[in-house]
Image (cartoon, coloured by chain):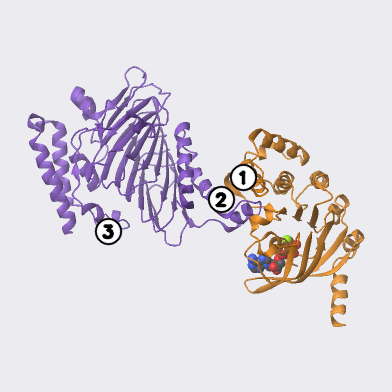
Chain colours: A purple, B orange
Amino acid sequence: MTSTNQAVDCYRSHFEAFERTLNGESQSGLHQLRREAMGKLSDSGFPTTRHEEWKFTNIAPITKIDFKPVFSSDAEGIQADQVRRFSFGTHHQLVFVDGHFSIELSTVGTLPKGVYCGSLAAAVKVSGDRVQQYLGRQVKIDETPFVSLNTAFLIDGAFIQIPDGVILEESIHLLFIASGRGQVLIAPRNLIVLGKRSQASIVESYVSLKDSQYLTDAVTEIIVGDEAVLEHDKLQKESSDAFHVAMIHARLAAKTTFTSNSIAIGGSIVRNNVTAILDAEGSECTLNGLSLATASQIIDNHTTIDHAKPHCASHELYKSILDGRSRGVFNGKIFVRPQAQKTDAKQTNKTLLLSDDATVDTKPQLEIFADDVKCTHGATVGQLDADQVFYLRSRGIDEMTARDILTFAFASDVVSRVHVPPLRIQLEALIHGRLDQGRKL
Amino acid sequence: MLEIRNLHASVNGKEILNGINLKVQAGEVHAIMGPNGSGKSTLAQVLAGRETYEATEGEVLYEGKDLLAMSPEDRAREGVFLAFQYPVEIPGVSNIYFLKAALNAVRKHKGLEEVDAVDFLQLVKQRTKLVEIDESLLNRPVNEGFSGGEKKRNEIFHMAVLEPKLAILDETDSGLDIDALRIVADGVNKLRKKDNAVIVVTHYQRLLNYIVPDFVHVLVDGRIVKSGGKELALELEERGYEWVKEADRVAIQA
Ligand SMILES: Nc1ncnc2c1ncn2[C@@H]1O[C@H](COP(=O)(O)OP(=O)(O)OP(=O)(O)O)[C@@H](O)[C@H]1O
Ligand SMILES: [Mg+2]
């Protein structure tokens, strides 16, 4: 306990130092939110494995370090061609360096009228009300201590707002680059608001310029209006020394189609929370996830699908491929509230263990309070199928390649669900690359 | 081409093959028949290199080399092909991708360059015609959701592309409708050459009307208890296996 309290003390003193730089702004609504969040964090402290929500993932290595919050953008020394290798060919690419928007590195093509696609900090400055009617209202600031921490240091991130009826043809890429400048806290806060009948696909990717130890604590709040369609893809491939804790929180209005694809490859301790609230009738929610872990990586995915209203469907497919001494965690909550009749929910979790030392903890958690519903869940944990390996070998394919082909096929089940073609191609190449590295993940 | 000498094999300590002797020369067709559970598939799998089966005694020479010492992939690259009795489904891997990887592995082993995309497509087109396989099966995951007959036909299609020297067909006829049986048999016949050989495992004489064997062997309890010409298959069809087993018992006692 002492170490988590010490961590809170460190963040509090960073917070106080931050407040002293604010002058007049310290009276703003935004800062009230931050102050409230800092208070919540002080009350809760950081969790230990005694907490139900964190029992499989020990975050002590994260709370041992005094990560210093990054208060402003410093993209100096970062060249456009260092960024290019992380792009996948869309014209709308917002680049954030250590969580702060870089106007120099970003490009935004022509967008339909009324679309906002840019920095959250800038939007707060220009039209604070437009942002604040949503910000911090979807996810509770004490939903987890890491949401509190993110909110306490909430300065910048992406703000995307698509007006009613607007269909974005091209996807928007939010590229979060860690510069590797030392032990820092990177706390981007993203807000995505889709108007009625609008459509978009938005990709978040988290990358590192060089290997270093830092903490990404990201929060994305998503509001999907009536009949809107959103695909949200997340690719996390940070430094193998980095810690990554992230929350994606989506609230779905009536008849929406929401897809979240979360691909986690990098990081040392990784925790993703993805939550979708089906808040009105007739929505369809799909959550897919893929983790590739090796060495001593820990990748922990917690998902929550909250069927609050009737006639909604949810589909969930989370897969992990674990090598080395890595650990995977999957906890999938599905709530079906008393009035959410005719809910159709399906959850699948599959783990492929490539080594004897890799382990997984998987826990479906279905809490169903309505009677006329269809809910299924299934979890499998296994190794590569010996019959399949032999079949491939019996046609001349060597054992390593056979194993790679089968491992890739296991992953491609999720990757093929990404509907942004250039991103999908990049993901495929990335996974092939991982498989080729010394024939290990 | 192939010489099996006193081959014994077991699985989990249970002996299944009990001293098999068999000689196959280039250009020949051998049929292996025998009751359910007699060890026909085990023999086929041992020849293809399945590790679940342990060869406990005897030896197998393939083109003068110790076959049992070779990895399954090396056997395939040297021209041994097994058409599985139960072809394996591989979700997520397209049939055509798999086949190209297999063909390139074989070519590489022979010191040939990777096949270029145009040539490969041409080869595939031609071979799909040969075994009259539906082209829609090419882009689907290997065997996944294929009907029983489609799986068998797909095995012969793989064989047609890979052009093995020694093909072992394990009950490729079962599950095929009458037309498919003829098409598959025609395909196998068209691929026959002076320098390759075929071992057909089957329960039915009907296939042997199309693929006419030079020798027919009867496998019972892990041993070949009788061998003969193609007329032996007709006799088995008529009389069943009991008389062969009985004759064998008498012979052993004597
Ligand atoms: N992996 C295994 N574990 C245990 N027993 C096995 C295994 N494989 C084969 N056997 C046994 O070995 C015997 C021979 O099986 P095999 O499949 O070779 O028979 P077969 O002659 O091909 O039969 P069929 O005509 O039904 O295909 C059977 O009794 C079978 O149950
Ligand atoms: Mg058999």
Horizontal and vertical percent for residue A160?
Answer: 31, 28
Q: Are marks 2 and 1 in contact (CB under 8 Å)?
A: yes
Horizontal and vertical percent for residue B181?
Answer: 80, 47
Q: Is residue B141 visible?
A: yes
The disc labelled 2 sits on which kind of residue?
A: Thr
Of residues A225 and B253, the one drawn nearer to the viewer in this rendering? B253
**Which quarter of the rendered picture does the N terminus of chain A lie within?**
bottom left
The disc labelled 3 sits on which kind of residue?
A: Thr
The disc labelled 1 sits on which kind of residue?
A: Ala
Question: Could you give the CA–CA distance between mark 3 and mark 1, rounded to whole angstroms?
Answer: 47 Å
Q: Residue at x 15, y 54 (%)?
A: A5
Mark 1 residue's CB less than 8 Å from ligand 1: no
In the depicted structure, whether residue A10 falls above or below residue B222: above
Circle 1 SS class: helix
Q: Which residue is mark 2?
A: A401
Question: Could you give the CA–CA distance between mark 2 and mark 1, rounded to whole angstroms?
Answer: 9 Å
Mark drawn on residue A49: 3
Horizontal and vertical percent for residue B215?
Answer: 87, 60
Eye-nearest disc, 3 or 2: 2
Q: Chain of mark 3?
A: A
Q: Which circle's residue, 3 or 2, is located before the other in the chain?
A: 3
Q: Are marks 3 and 1 in contact (CB under 8 Å)?
A: no
* Crowd tier of the residue under label 3, counting other residues whose Cα lies within 10 Å: few below 14, some 14–19, many 20 or above: few
Labels 2 and 1 in the same subunit: no
